[in-house]
Amino acid sequence: MEDNTVTTFAGVKAFKQDLSVHKEWDEIEYGDEKFYMTKKEFEHIEQCEECVDNKRPTSYICSDENCLNYKYRYIIRETDLYNITMDDQYEDKYEVTLYMVVSPESLCNERKEEVNSSMDRVDYISIVEYGTCSIMLGNEVISEEALERNVLAAKEAVRLIDSMRGFYLDRAVNRIGTDGWHIIRYALGKVDRPF
Ligand SMILES: [Zn+2]
């Protein structure tokens, strides 16, 4: 009998359980955690009115906070909660979190220095671990038995999330209550505070 169980991630239903989606992701073991990162580096290009009116090239460096040109990838972080907490209530429990992460090269110099001084390097994984320049799009705590389908659902969800990222960035809220756009502006140095 066909398994019709539908897994959702970040509110997106994964109907297909399409294994081919794995080809779009790299797997990275780092310390006690496992990360999955999109092979593709995505690019967001948005110009302010003045840049549009003056037909400036997208490479033009503009300080207007509505000019948002940056690269990014999606990263899934898989955490074995028991391994981290050693608490019996988390036995067999995993946390799967999906992030949109501004690329190391797109970060403004201050943010690069902050990540570097805390993590000793500036790459996609260290940016996620550092925290303030990544946007959490979804988060589930699940049992080990559901882990594989959940990660697959998260990977599938990215296909839809990226095409509707404006909606998800409006909705995404980080720990200090800022929306996704503000985090991107902070990462790019368009605003001085992460909140
Ligand atoms: Zn501009």
Image (spheres, rainbow, N blue to C red):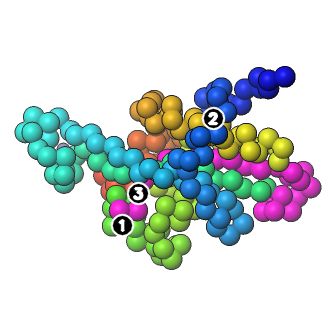
Report the amino acid beneath label 3.
Answer: Ser
Q: Say which mark, if any, is on residue 18.
A: 2
- What is the secondary structure assignment of the residue under circle 3? loop
In the rendered image, residue 56, in percent from the top left (x then y), is placed at 11, 44
Closer mark to the observer between disc 2 and disc 3:
2
Please state which of residues 160 and 4 is positioned toward the viewer in this rendering: 4
Q: Residue at label 3? A: 103
Which comes sooner in the sequence, label 1 or label 3?
3
Instruction: Say what secondary structure mark 2 lies in.
Output: loop
- Which residue appears at 53% of the width and 47% of the height? 24
Residue at mark 2 to residue at mark 3: CA–CA distance: 27 Å
* Label drawn at residue 110: 1
Secondary structure found at label 1:
helix
Magenta stretch encompasses residue 170: no
Q: Which of marks 1 and 3 is in front?
A: 3
* Picture coordinates of residue 174, whole percent (x, y): 55, 45
Q: Is residue 72 visible?
A: no
Could you tell me the amino acid type at mark 1?
Glu
Q: Is residue 121 above or below residue 94?
A: below
Residue at horizontal 84%, vertical 44%? 145
Residue contact at pointers 1 and 2, CB within 8 angstroms: no
Q: What residue type is labelled 2?
A: Asp
Q: How many marks?
A: 3
Q: Do the residues labelled 2 and 3 touch (CB within 8 Å)?
A: no
- Region rendered in magenta: 82-105
Answer with the quadrant where ligand 1 appears in the image.
top left
Determine whether, in the image, residue 32 is placed left or right of residue 122.
Answer: right
